[in-house]
Image (tube, rainbow, N blue to C red):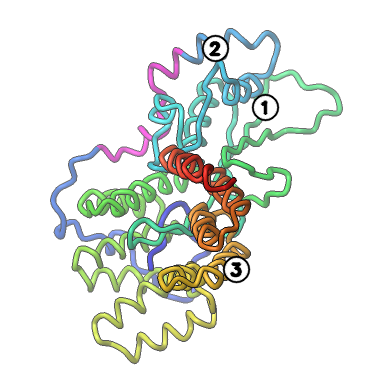
Amino acid sequence: MVATCVLPGCAVNPVQQLSPPAALVHDDLFPPNQEDLTPDRILAPSPGMRAFIQARLTHGLRGREPRDVLVDALAAPGELKLEYDAEMTRTASEAFDARMGNCLSLTLMTASFARELGVPVIFRQIYQEEQYSRVGDLQVVSGHVNIGLGRRPTDFKVLGDQDALLVVDFLPGAQIRRQRAMELDESTVLAMYMNNRAAEWMALGILDRAYWWARAAWLQSPRLTASLNTLGVIYRRHGDLQPAEQAFREVLRREPGNTQAMGNLAQLLRNTDRVAEASVWEEKLARLEPYPPFKLFDLGLAAMRSGNYAEARRFFLKEIDRSSYYHEFYFWLALANVGLGRWNEVRQSLARAEELSTTVRQRQLYTAKLESLKSRMH
């Protein structure tokens, strides 16, 4: 089990003696870095972005607030026409060039535009149920960020208008007014970007590049314990078990209830024949998390393999009850319904999978499957 992506670190336990961040990186285990990991470039506007500002934003003000013009440009078909795509995390300029990105990429792009326009920005971490996904044998837990746009000191204010912060959220179906948010500093947001890139390289099996990104994230913001957990998983997959164990234990010193690090440490201990200690951590994890992510889904897959489609459908529905925003659960629910001949539910489940998919490739896949099944639904 592994936790990566954009989760911020929690409060540090003041009782424990914590290791300094640099003590947990081991550059000698990996080839020298060949990439530009400069934090400044993540938010830097490109010449194309500045040209867009001149052509589409500053000339369109006409007495309007710059933040309102920017928000219109983000949504208007004739302007940026952005598409949500979580296949990779892009810098601000990369998201602009591609006209797509995940919530973090599009937030970075919006922040870059806003700062060029002199609009104050606030990065926001959203408190919500963590979303789990799988990439091969890598399990990923991701959080969600958005951005608040403030008013410039010189902006004209209408008497009685108290809406000082305009929130922009790129996650499809986001309920902004119901969100509980915590403000993030820029250093943490940049570390989130780096940690995402580390997770994406790790999912591709390119551990050398994953290491340098995770290292950069950890040193950028040592409060982001997700990056130290990512670093530990990279060490473990690279065969460096002692540094991996050191990283997982450090996360747990800082956050004793961190279930991702707990699961990773327990797995490492069991694989190195320290069964008694592994059992202690596994029992604690079971108390904190009696039904781990994907447990019911895996039971559904087992039922599918045995041809018990009714049982599979029951497990998939239970998994959806506790995590209703993961596209793959609906896809397999559709397949179980195919086995049961419940064609109306097949159509509904595939449509929901398409709606919740986070990449262009996934949406195309589900659209194609829905089209191929239409002839069997009548």
Please provide percent x and percent y for residue 22: 28, 59
Query: Can see residue 184?
Result: no
Magenta range is 36-51
Earlier sequence position, callout 3 versus callout 2: 2
Which label belongs to residue 151?
1
Q: Amino acid at mark 2?
A: Arg
User: Mark 1 Cα within 10 Å, few/some/many (few <14, many 20+)?
Assistant: many
- Location of residue 142 in the rendering, given as x and y in whole percent from the top left corner: 48, 54
Q: Is residue 290 above or below residue 318?
A: below
Taking the magenta stretch, the answer to whether it contains residue 345 is: no
Of callouts 2 and 1, the N-terminal one: 2
Kindly report which numbered mark, 2 or 1, lies closer to the viewer in this rendering.
2
| Residue drawn at x 44%, y 26% as measured from the top left | 96
- Element under disc 3: helix
Residue under the image location 68 percent in, 49 percent down: 179
In the rendered structure, the answer to whether residue 356 lies left or right of residue 69 reads left
